[in-house]
Amino acid sequence: MKKVVGAFVLLLLAGCGIGLPWPNLPPPGAAHHDVLLVGDNLMRSTQTVLPGVLTEATIFDEHRDGSGLLTKIDGMDPADFVIAMLDAHPTTDTVLAEWTGICADPCPSTYGSQEFYDAWDAAMQSIVDAVRSRPDPPTLVWVITPPAPPDPAGAPYGFTADVSNALSWRTRAAAAGLDVPLADWWGALMAQDDFLGHYDQFLAFQVWPEAYATPHKVRTDDLVLYTVDGALRTSVWTATKLREVWANA
């Protein structure tokens, strides 16, 4: 016990946040699933590991780096883009959607303004409506994006911590009203040393065969994208939610 306590003290002194315990990942079900991924750079990071965790699924990766919900994606409105990707992958039974708050320059609304948030909410609503209007509509699961890095790190990607974090919390409220299940990347990558959790590049958690929690680098040196350990965290949280949703369908 003294060794464990001492290890946590060293982690805190080293600037390593304490990650949440791993969720109880259900075993894969008997059914096969086809999952369409749409989103931005963070979805790119997760999809490098997700197929190895979600072994009962075929993954169609259609993320677009630098995309957001206020500007065109492949020349289309976001909802039309998602429908086009469903047309390209007609066997899709589940859509996993994630956008962290990027607004490509020039942003049509003042970034972080009420107009910006209202337009973002409307775009999310349009995607939900478009997916649900399909014949035999696929299940839509939305991602709660994780705590964002300090603004200098987010600047090259076109988002700020305040806006990204606000959208992450707004997503919770919007999804509740729309009855959309959520995959929680906030919980996967937050450091839990204050009430709501916060951003950290290193998290302490246990990975077999470790005897107790040790530091793991979860974001790459750009402070935004995920390392393999970070992608493993978001993938396990995602697979947990998807398997829960599929089991209850």
Image: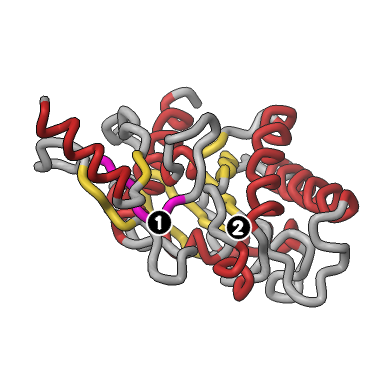
- The numbered mark at residue 86 is 2
x and y, in percent, of residue 100 in the image: 62, 56
Sooner in the amino-acid sequence: mark 2 or mark 1: 2
Corner quadrant of residue 31: top left
- Say if 158 sits above or below 32 in the image: below
At label 1, the amino acid type is: Gln
The quarter of the picture where residue 218 lies is bottom left
Q: Residue at x 16, y 36 (%)?
A: 212
**Residue 241 seen anywhere in this rendered image of the structure:** yes
Q: Is residue 98 left or right of residue 72?
A: left
Disc 2 from disc 1: Cα separation? 34 Å
Q: Residue at x 69, y 75 (%)?
A: 74
| Image side of residue 81 versus residue 192, left or right | right
Give the foreground label among 2 and 1.
1
Q: In the depicted view, which residue is nearer to us: 233 or 5? A: 5
Mark 1: secondary structure: loop
Q: Where are the magenta residues, as a range?
A: 200-205
Residue at 41%, 48% (x, y): give it: 234
Q: Which mark is residue 201?
A: 1
